[in-house]
Amino acid sequence: MPGAGKSTVGVILAKRLGYDFIDTDLLLIKKAGRALPEILKSAGVDGFLELESAVGQSIKCDRTVIATGGSMVLLEAAMENLRNSGVVIWLDTELEELERRISDKADRGIAARPGESLADIFKMRRPYYEKYSDIRIPCVAGTDNVVAMIRQALNYRGSGA
């Protein structure tokens, strides 16, 4: 979900693992040549998702932590590419915490239809996070705790860390 801490946790995890780090929102911005809110305004949600899917499908890397945009989970081809390349981790953050972190959806560039609340997005996307994740990490007790839980889960799976 937007505001779950994917980029923050991803950067720290990558540093601790000695891996590269990619933020797909930044790849999307580079591909489109404009900020996320501008892409949504000009292309609409469907056009935004089409661009995001192309970004997700194009990622080919190794020993890399990838922070995806929150809506990438809606894009089957992109998610299958990511799943085939590595381990998909869901940073499961409570709705109330997400609402506290996100004050304005428009400024964040969240792929939402007119009138959709953060609660609506949360409810709609949750089954997709459950479907595509290999590991679910409850986001509690701060970033360092979340990173430690991810490393422990990766070690348990035999995926390194």
Image (cartoon, rainbow, N blue to C red):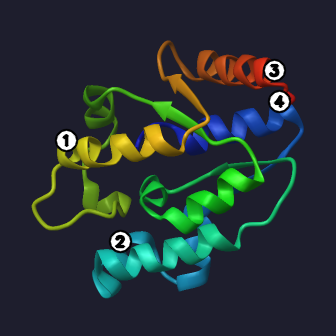
Position of 141 compared to 27: left or right?
Answer: left
Q: Residue at x 59, y 45 (%)?
A: 7
Q: Is residue 16 above or below residue 7?
A: above
Residue at image mark 3 = 155
Q: Earlier in the sequence, mark 2 or mark 3?
A: 2
Callouts 1 and 3 close, C-beta under 8 Å: no
Q: Where does residue 49 sit, x and y in percent of width and height?
A: 42, 73
What separation in Å lies between label 2 and label 3 (alpha carbons)?
38 Å
- SS state under label 3: helix
Q: Earlier in the sequence, mark 1 or mark 3?
A: 1
Residue type of the residue flagged with mark 3: Asn
Q: Quadrant of the N terminus?
A: top left
What separation in Å lies between label 4 and label 1 (alpha carbons)?
33 Å
Picture disc at residue 119:
1
Residue type of the residue flagged with mark 2: Pro
- SS state under label 2: helix
Residue at image mark 2 = 37
Query: Would you call the spot at circle 1 few (<14 residues within 10 Å), some (14-19), or many (20 or more)?
Result: few
Q: Earlier in the sequence, mark 4 or mark 1?
A: 4
Q: Where does residue 135 sit, x and y in percent of width and height?
A: 60, 30
What separation in Å lies between label 1 and label 3 (alpha carbons)?
33 Å
Callouts 4 and 3 close, C-beta under 8 Å: no
Picture disc at residue 16:
4
Q: Nearer the viewer, mark 2 or mark 1?
A: 1
- SS state under label 4: helix
